[in-house]
Image: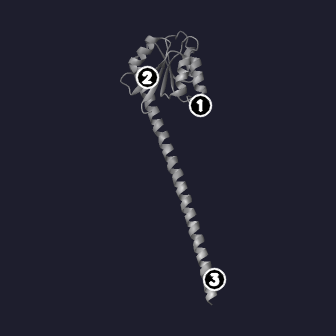
Amino acid sequence: MNTARVLLVDDRKDNLLALEAIMQGLPVQTVAAHSGEEALKHLLVDDFAVILLDAQMPDMDGFETARRIKQRERTRGVPIVFLTAADADGHLALRGYAAGAVDYLTKPIDPWVLRAKVAVLVELWEKTRKVRDQAALTATYERRLTHAAARVDQALRLTDGTNHELKVLLEQLAEDLS
């Protein structure tokens, strides 16, 4: 996967369309989910650079969705940005951060601020992916080098053994000739 994916989670279709419009022009692929359950299903099969998550949804709210995302080893490190229209209580932001969010934005959201935040998180995701790929490549080279060194060592031992056997045979031949 070369393009970063951003998971958009909101129970309102108009909000999802607005988020998709805000993300246009960024080097990302957006995937929309209409509920927390749908978001969790997407996270089972796809990797995401960022999750934009509505805090207030029916059935499973964003806080519970975030809690479940953070429980899974595979998705634990995916940054979550909460988006909500409900900010009558400042404790909701604290609840969002406690659930694992890296940010908590209230609506109406400034599209330029949201784009900038997503762009930074995507850039971090890309750099992390490059470091992980480089580490895997380095590990592969180390395994190959270790294998080659073992083969060289084995060849040297065989050569030493052969030389020793030749020396013994020459000594025996020399004794026989004496």
Report which residue position mark 1 lands on. 73
- In this view, the residue farthest toward the bottom is 178
Q: Residue at x 55, y 64 (%)?
A: 155
Q: Within 10 angstroms of label 2, few (less than 14), some, or many (20 or more) residues?
A: many
Q: Within 10 angstroms of label 1, few (less than 14), some, or many (20 or more) residues?
A: few
Displayed quadrant of residue 70:
top right
Displayed quadrant of residue 20:
top left
Which tag is nearer the camera, tag 3 or tag 2?
3
Report which residue position mark 2 lands on. 30
Secondary structure of the residue carrying tag 2 is strand
Q: Is residue 33 visible?
A: yes
Residue 84 x/y as whole percent: 50, 14
Q: CA distance from mark 1 to mark 2?
A: 22 Å
The amino acid type of the residue labelled 2 equals Thr
Q: Quadrant of the N terminus?
A: top left
Q: Quadrant of the C terminus?
A: bottom right
Which tag is nearer the camera, tag 3 or tag 1?
3
Report which residue position mark 3 lands on. 172
* Image position of 91 (left or right of 123): right
The amino acid type of the residue labelled 1 equals Glu
Residue 169 x/y as whole percent: 61, 79
Displayed quadrant of residue 28:
top left
Q: Is residue 74 above or below residue 21?
A: below
Secondary structure of the residue carrying tag 3 is helix
Q: Residue at x 40, y 21 (%)?
A: 23
The amino acid type of the residue labelled 3 equals Gln
Q: Is residue 42 above or below residue 60?
A: below
